[in-house]
Amino acid sequence: MKALRNVSRRAFLKASGGLALAFYLPQPLAQSGPGRTVSTGVSGAFSPNAFIRIGADNTVTVIVKHLEMGQGTYTGLPTLVAEELDADWSQMRAEGAPADAKQYNNLFWGEAQGTGGSTALANSYEQLRKAGAAARAMLVSAAAARWNVSASEISVSKGIVFHKPSGKRATFGELAADAATQAVPDDVRLKDPKDFTLIGKPAARTDARAKSNGSAIFTQDVKLPGMLTAVVLHPPRFGATLKSFDAARAKQVNGVEQVVAFSTAATNGVAVLARDYWSAKKGRDALTAEWDESEAFRLGSADIMNQYKSLATKPGLSARKDGDAETALKGAAKTLEAAYEFPYLAHASMEPMNCVVRLDGQACEIWNGEQFQTIDQAMVAKQLGLGAEQVRIHQLYAGGSFGRRANPKSDFVLEAAAIAKATNGAAPVKLVWGREDDMRAGFYRPMYYHTLKAGLDAQGSLVAWKHMIVGQSILTGTAFEPMMVKDGIDGTSVEGAANLPYAIPNLAVELHSPKIGVPVQWWRSVGSTHTAFATECFLDEVAREAKQDPYELRRALLGKHPRHKAALELAAQKAGWGRPKKGVSRGIAVHESFNTIVAQVVEVSRKQSSVKIERVICAVDCGVAVNPNIVAMQMESGIGFGLSAALAGAITLKEGIVEQSNFHDYPVLRMNQMPKIEVFIVPSKEKPTGVGEPGTPVIAPALANAILAMQGKPIRALPMSSQGVTFV
């Protein structure tokens, strides 16, 4: 979700409407924020700032402003605090922050709180280190005052404050009450990286035990007194609206309490509320409804692709123009052309969309795996006629998201609020989408079509490159459009192509953004999901035509991008590139997304008429690797996620209706299909960059290039199963 990295603050507030209560704090780093003062609290806890709470029991709780959906924020962010606090890792805890952009805004987004664009750790890196350093300074001051010694004589290590000359020592918990009386320092000095004891080292995940023993709280675990579960009947076609419904049979289902119609800015439908999910689902299945489809979307996938292919023959809006690609192509000694097709994709997170809402007089309380606090808070407030401050959101764990829970229209969260309102707040409502709802009524990675042309001179050097991209904008019609669509160019549609790092003297990238009535939004690694495949696969085709090694060609073209080159070289070296392995073919790709560079080499072999992925070698430059284990986990996760889409993922439409419904017809990678993965981290002193998404876009082109090397035939459409490629 790179789209969300550098949003203009004023433009965001103006476009979003209702968000003006949030404001940017340039000094939230080590100071008490609004609404949170330094106090011992009812349990004697020490809270030096909005991010840290040290209890008398010696636990250090970090209030994490970003959603934990599996990517490791509840480990990475506490590591930053623990490092500067000199805490022992065993005493660290994590807790989700409330929706409060005044204190917990994403520093890259201005006055907005949320998680996306692989920004969680990157935007928090200095902020939470300073918060930890401030807490440490106050503990030291408290110890110095208690022992009547100079603060300069006091040391802190692994959660113990001690004074060597006298032998006195105390835990954080023992000093908490005294530390709360100390002044919050105006400025703190951060550690030199050479002195890090936790950053850059593996550490156990703070959420591992709870997720293993079942004590972790997800939305589905929330149970409130009198709560009803809601299941929704959505229109079968996008854009259709409810005309009428008959709830007689639904109300006869045992456990069904109420049936209500609702409408929001994003969705509409009929909700069946029951005492449990199964009763609500049976009630929903018994409903009959009539829909107004006069404005409904009715095209099929083939119809859309035909429109895209026609558009690709016409000039588009310029996203990048270096030199004169058209003239260079005409004068080239040899030219190549290729076209690549990409389907719609579902997010298919393991926990489908859900949300709990309780209305209480003039307030709304929400429990959710919350990814877009500020947007959701404002949208719900508008739906209910409340002020944003009257909407309280509890951030729980989420069982995956891949961008889906950060919906710019707050679709399923608004549904839950609208249903609760339709029942006059008589009972708390837990909205539950089943897998079929998630597949058919959700938002998707857009379908795309790419055409590329390249020109080679007489020596086989690449002198021209023209890239046309056709696909829906994910920003059009959202609060982000005014500041993130420039001159008609949605930057998320061309990222990875418009910033291609290769030294090509004549390079042009153009874009068409047709308006299609299929709801779309960001999907893990956003535009790079398709641009990386098109550019990296086409470059391999160029290498074959020029009779050059694809690795060496990339190296030669990356002279001005040393970080790309270093990642590429590391992956190739670890894979043994240039040293053939009997029965094995290799493919390579390198791509930057979210300021992180990832290079991958895929090894494949032929097993009868199928392809076996033997090994994936991944090199990543993500700046300082705060927790190398989590970096490796996220590379592995991104590779698995990307393989799911590359091998078989596709959402297809027939007369406007989504054909897929569950994992039987939208398969994801099975355990036995997961290849051996080796992850290598490029040493770096740069500030951390994202790791949640950058592993995803590289795997498909690296795999396709390995298959090209094996069979000599390029793959130009995804999923690969649609091209007759089978895998074991």
Image (cartoon, helix red, strand yellow):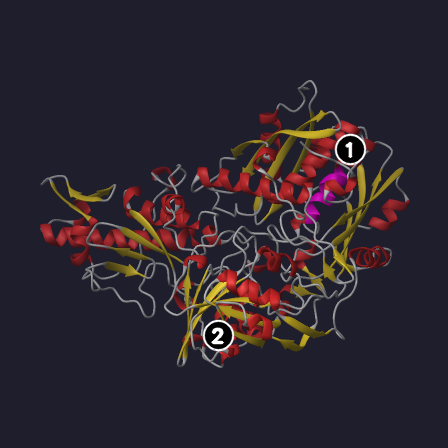
Q: Residue at horizontal 16%, vertical 57%?
A: 178
- Badge 1: residue crowd in 10 Å (few <14, some 14–19, many ≥20): many
Q: Residue at horizontal 45%, vertical 72%?
A: 22
Q: Position of residue 91 (x, y in %)?
A: 27, 46
Amino acid residing under circle 1: Ala
The mark nearer the N terminus, 2 or 1, is 2
Q: Quadrant of residue 674?
A: top right
Is 622 situated above or below 316?
above
Q: Which residue is mark 2?
A: 420
Q: Position of residue 286 (x, y in %)?
A: 61, 67
533 drawn magenta: yes
Q: Residue at horizontal 72%, vertical 44%?
A: 719
Taking the view exactly as shown, the residue that stands out farthest to the top is: 582
Q: Is residue 422 visible?
A: yes
Q: Quadrant of residue 296?
A: bottom right
- Please report the bounds of the magenta region as a residue range: 530-539
In three-dimensional space, the C-alpha distance between marks 2 and 1, rounded to whole angstroms, equals 59 Å
For label 2, the SS is helix
Q: Which residue is mark 1?
A: 543
For label 1, the SS is helix
505 drawn magenta: no
Is 506 situated above or below 16?
above
Left or right, 220 with reference to 78: right
Amino acid residing under circle 2: Ala
Q: Nearer the viewer, residue 227 or 216?
A: 227
Is 76 situated above or below 293?
above
